[in-house]
Image: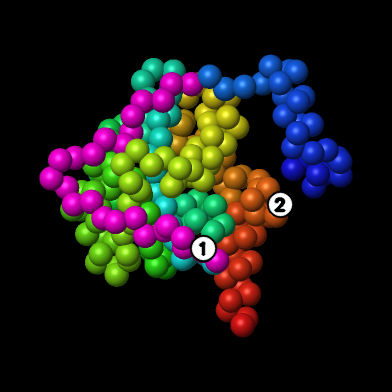
Amino acid sequence: MLCREGIQIGRRRVTTMMKRMGIEAIYRRPNTSKPMPGHKIYPYLLRGLKVECPNQVWAMDITYIPMVRGFVYLAAVVDWFSRRVLAWQLSITMEAGFCIEAVEEALAQHGKPEIFNTDQGSQFTSAGFTGVLTGNAVAISMDGKGAWRDNVFIERIWRSVKYEEVYLHAYDSVGEARASIGRYLDFYNRRRPHSSLDRQTPDEAYFGHLSQSAAA
């Protein structure tokens, strides 16, 4: 963002200045990926796969959002190629319902991916969740147990959400958390450039590539 404003500075310099200023995040992280015995586990389909376009692979994860009193859970569907957040939901429980709502919203607004990747959390292995994907002829992929590296890019998105939004605010209510996080995710998609996207925003990478494909 600084570069786009005409300020010539690199990531290492920004990191150095942040360390000097003492800018960092301190947060709790409970386990949000507990498996459920008896649920079907699907094989991991992304090993060696080159992701070359939007809607080829989507991923989903859940993270913990602290508030002044209590906490909520944030679930998001993300396009693997562009890092764009396609849909998201907040919930005060870890039940599968809010994950299903987010997936259904993403499918309704953006079509469907070839592959949908998650971890082995009980929300994602539930019959209700996997049924939405199989009903739309989407191939299901699941990370190996404890293989956090498989979904590391979505962890980086959570890092951005928390460092740049959540830990700067003390939400008094679920409604306040929903509104504030919604504003941040809109900013994240439309205005926040990514080094992994050659300094494009997720919207630019997602819609720009779709436009090129349609033109071709």
Instruction: Residue 131: say if magenta.
Output: no
Residue placed furthest toward the front:
48
Which structural element holds mark 2?
loop
Q: Residue at x 64, y 59 (%)?
A: 204
Query: For the residue labelled by badge 1, is the local secondary structure a helix, a strand or a loop?
Result: loop
Question: Is residue 51 on the magenta stretch?
Answer: yes
Q: In the image, is 178 to the left or to the right of 36?
A: right
At label 2, which amino acid type do we have?
Answer: Arg
Image quarter (top left, top right, bottom left or bottom right) of the C terminus: bottom right
Nearest to the observer: residue 55 or residue 49 = 49
Q: For the point 36% across and 25% down, which residue is it?
A: 30
Q: What is the number of callouts on the image?
A: 2
Q: Which residue is mark 1?
A: 51
Q: Which mark is residue 4?
A: none
| Residue that carries the numbered disc 2 in the rendered image | 199
For the magenta stretch, what is the residue range? 27-52
Regarding residue 89, the answer to whether it shows in the image is no
Q: What is the crowding at mark 1: few (fewer than 14 residues within 10 Å), some, or many (at least 20)?
A: few
Dominant secondary-structure state across the stretch colored magenta: loop
